[in-house]
Image (cartoon, grey):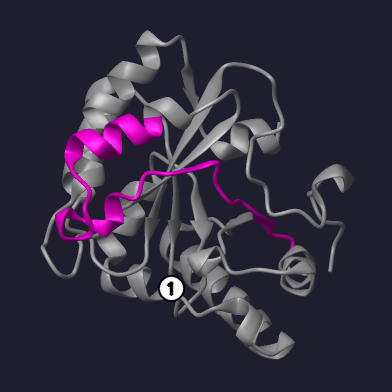
Amino acid sequence: MAACWIPASLLGRDLELLPTTSKVVALTFDGGSGAEGLSSITATLKKEGVPATFFLTGRWVQAHPDETRALASRYPIGNHSMTHPEFTTLSSNQIRTELTTTSTLIASVTGSTPRLFRFPFGDRDARTITLVNGQCLLPIRWSVDSLGWKGTSGGMTVSSVRERVVTRVGPGGIVLMHLGANPDDGTTLDAAALPGIIGDLRSAGYRFVTVPEVVEG
């Protein structure tokens, strides 16, 4: 393999914060199953002129190729595995297959090979991080999980999602949200809370960035 782009200081890490002290925040969205909140999320981002970073599974890309191409034309796309398994339960060969299959698929649909990765369920250890780095992928975790994925059936509301994100973000924060609906109640709380989150963070003096523009320079 050719020399990898990942800085030595970031190897062996599942990055929870962007490497900066500036008052910036990265909004990130995972696509693992459905896309019920996608149109609302992208409409809000466009209206507000806010960048974001998306992490998509191979299965999501297969189910939504047109949407994937549209996203890639405006935003960075990261690898989120093919089938969304718990990586620490997989063999090294299974992990490599999950990674390479997804990266190849994303490249075939968008024309660009992803350089970022997010562990499904956030499930990782030193071995799995090393294997991800071995595919020239930088693992990106999060500093704040909105918990919008829990839905109203899980005790969350639009206002509680908004408050959770805004009160927990710090400089270099990475916010985790989701594109799909809660399977039990059909809610898309992240999409509904997004306008308020953007407004509140701007009022607090934050600037929005993509993950690559900070970690890739």
| Above or below, comparing residue 181 to residue 131 in the picture | above
- Name the residue at 36% across, 67% down: 32
Q: Quadrant of the C terminus?
A: top right
Please state which of residues 112 and 175 is positioned toward the viewer in this rendering: 175
Q: Magenta span has 47?
A: no
**Residue 198 appears at what percent x and percent y?**
32, 24
| Above or below, comparing residue 14 to residue 18 in the picture | below
Judged left or right of residue 21, residue 86 is left
- Name the residue at 28% across, 32% down: 162
Does the rendering let one see residue 91? yes
- Name the residue at 20% across, 62% down: 182
Q: Which residue is mark 1?
A: 58
Judged left or right of residue 99, residue 129 is right
Q: Residues within 10 Å of mark 1 (few under 14, many from 20)?
A: many
Does the rendering let one see residue 192? no
Q: Residue furthest front?
A: 155
- Name the residue at 55% across, 72% down: 104
Q: Quadrant of residue 75?
A: top left
**Residue 87 appears at what percent x and percent y?**
60, 78
Q: Magenta span has 150?
A: yes
Q: Quadrant of the N terminus?
A: bottom right
Mark 1: amino acid: Gly
Q: Which residues are magenta?
A: 136-165
Please state which of residues 155 and 11 is positioned toward the viewer in this rendering: 155
Helix, strand or loop for disc 1: helix
| Above or below, comparing residue 151 to residue 126 in the picture | above
Q: Quadrant of residue 149?
A: bottom left
**Residue 169 appears at what percent x and percent y?**
49, 29
**Residue 201 appears at what percent x and percent y?**
39, 19
